[in-house]
Amino acid sequence: MLRPSLTIGVALLSFATVVHADDKDWKEVRIATEGGYAPWNYTNPDGTLGGFEIDLANDLCNRMKVKCTISAQSFDSMIPALNAGKFDAIIDDISITPKREEVIAFSIPYASVCYTFATSDASLADQFKEDTGVISLNDQAATDKALEPLKAALKDKTIGTLAAGGSVAFVETYLKGVTLMRQYKTAEARDLDLAAGRVDLVVGGQDLLKNSAAKKGNESVKLFGPCFQGGVVGKGAGVGLRKSDTNLKAMFDKAIREAQADGTITKLSIPVFGIDVTPKQ
């Protein structure tokens, strides 16, 4: 599931104060992650970091032949801290969106996840089932066709979203005036209310919704409807970088392409998410 917006205004100010030469010979790369967004990244009881992105980051660093240090950072301050030079890269399921691209650079996507729906309402789940097809939000005709029957079924339903995230933008863009939106600070709180029937459905990344539905106590939760990608959902998750560090971007791009080509991203993602998040390019 792709992450909520970071603090763009502060980040713009920070960006203006830092200039890095783009011909730096990189030997060590400092990577920031949240360490609390399982299963993408998390902190183990012994304080070490784990998760899909930690394993992938280590693989990419080996390919780039650089020493990497990965540390946990506050999510909200990541982009300003990156542009202030406190670390060199962000790997934290950050979606590549036009607004963020105004402030920082991104590698090519290392993960591409679509947004879908989940419910504990059996009648709703049975009506639509889970659709394995992916709808591009950049294709207006296909989007309208996919949403038309959903809008009729979701009229006046309460839908849970993550506050300030891509799911909020999705609902405000496509389901405004149809559903009643309830925002949550954490996926855990949202999913507890879904399982308890306090919201009729939720919208979010297919990867995390599958993970939640598989947990004990969530047997009633089912995914349903098509999966939407692109547009307000973003291009996928990429490594966040300073705009001036063009050669570091080139290094990450090359390493990600290699990890896609040899099946590493597939191998790392399927056991974690139950789906292959390798971007289809």
Image (cartoon, rainbow, N blue to C red):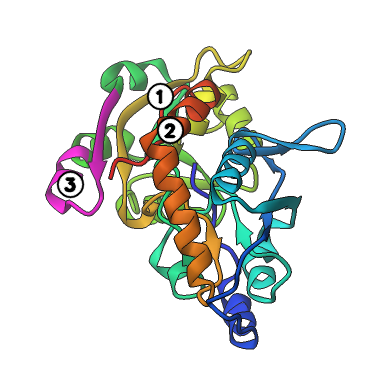
Identify the residue position indicated by label 1 in the image.
223
Residue lying at the far bottom in this picture: please name it.
17
Residue drawn at the location 43% of the way across and 52% of the way down: 254
Q: Mark 1, mark 2: which one is toward the viewer? A: 2
Mark 3 secondary-structure assignment: helix
Q: Earlier in the sequence, mark 3 or mark 1?
A: 3
Q: Earlier in the sequence, mark 2 or mark 3?
A: 3
Measured Cα–Cα span from mark 3 to mark 1: 20 Å
Specify the amino acid type for callout 1: Leu
Residue segment shown in magenta: 131-146
**Does residue 191 appear to the left or right of 157 in the view shown?**
right
Identify the residue position indicated by label 3 in the image.
144
The local crowd at label 1, few if under 14, some if 14 to 19, many if 20 or more residues have their Cα within 10 Å, is many
**Does residue 85 appear to the left or right of 249 in the view shown?**
right
Residue drawn at the location 60% of the way across and 69% of the way down: 25
Seen in the picture, residue 271 relative to 202 is either above or below; the reply is above
Q: Is residue 130 magenta?
A: no
x and y, in percent, of residue 204 in the image: 46, 39
Q: Mark 2, mark 3: which one is toward the viewer? A: 2
* Nearer-the-camera pick, 39 or 158: 39
* Nearer-the-camera pick, 60 or 23: 23
Measured Cα–Cα span from mark 1 to mark 2: 8 Å
